[in-house]
Image (cartoon, rainbow, N blue to C red):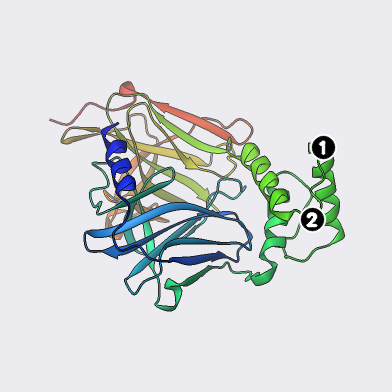
Amino acid sequence: MLNRMLIAAFIALGFSGAAQAGQVCNETSFMVEAAKAWRTPTGLAVEGWARIAPGGCADIGPSTNTEQYLYARTTRAYLGGVREWRGSLDICVDETDFAFEGVADCETLGLETRKFRQLTEAERDHAVLVEVADFGDRAEEAGLQRLLQSAGYDINVIDGYAGRRTRRQVEAFEEEVGRSFGADRAALIEALHERAMTRNTSLGLQVCNDANLPVGVAVARANGEGWETRGWWRIAPGGCAQTLSAQLTSNETYVYAQLIDEDALRPLAGGTEAFCITPARFTSQTRSECTSSGFQPALFRAAPAPEEGGAVMRLDLDDFEEPLP
């Protein structure tokens, strides 16, 4: 509670030196959430999350000559999981909408970090999010197609060109919800996004901490012919974290965790599969010869069998080994 009160105080005070906002535009086929940070006399100010529809723009932060940084992610409405537009600078963020200034100790306030990208001088006034397909002014139509697909409708190709198949699937959605959206594309995209969120947020892997101490969690998942391992999610007592958002199948996901017991780290017991980890936040495609690659080996436990593409793993004190003397 104290952490959130401190953040609320930063929000109430506002930002020093804020000027006319810089614009962030979304030329991708995804609904995105963006956060921006910038330099102030007391440190970094940061605010998020501005939700930007495909083809849309939002004003975030000041338009000044100071250094600015941007991070964006897709919402959890999509079957492939959350995608990120990021850089290399770790900056504090909150799970929900936030705004604060001069915060450097993320962990003390219960905040997470995300890797922000420094904007060029030209991007401070107008930054654009793009993807490989480079939809440009076709982003709204491509976003509509992708949301139809994510909501379970018959869309095979995301190309940003209006066609009969897209129109038929929009009509099917309108018939199902009992509403005609006509030319109101914004309302149609919002309704489809809500439907896709409802359908897909139950997918993936959620890890919950039923212990009385915080835990750090890493997850390994099959990726093509290899494996990808990511960590860490810090989960407070009584909390949960969505570690994967994509649809799960059996025998493809493993979990490792450490109980943070004062100065000791108690590893997860019962692990059967070895993957590579590091003490700091990491992503790895390495599974063998961990030490020679700058990692360390750890035994991961199989995630629970998924039901309809999703699973919940609950951890309590009995799931961890005793601390080493």
Quadrant of residue 68 within the rendered picture = bottom left
Location of residue 66 with respect to 295 vertically, above or below: below
Residue 70: give x, y in percent of width and height: 42, 63
Closest to the observer, 300 or 88: 88
Please identify the quadrant where the C terminus is shown.
top left
Task: Find the residue positioned furthest to the bottom.
Answer: 122
| Mark sitting on residue 66 | none
Cα separation, mark 2 vs mark 1, equals 16 Å
Q: Name the residue under label 1.
A: 178
Give the residue number, with chain letter if any, for mark 2. Answer: 183
Quadrant for the N terminus in the image:
top left
Q: Estimate the x, y position of residue 178 in percent, counting from the top left.
A: 82, 37
Helix, strand or loop status at disc 2: loop
Q: Which residue is drawn at 49% across and 62% down?
A: 59
Assess disc 2: are there few (<14), some (14-19) or many (≥20) residues with their C-alpha within 10 Å of its C-alpha: few
Amino acid carrying label 1: it is: Gly
Q: Viewer-nearest of labels 2 and 1?
A: 2
The x, y position of residue 95, in whole percent, is: 41, 43
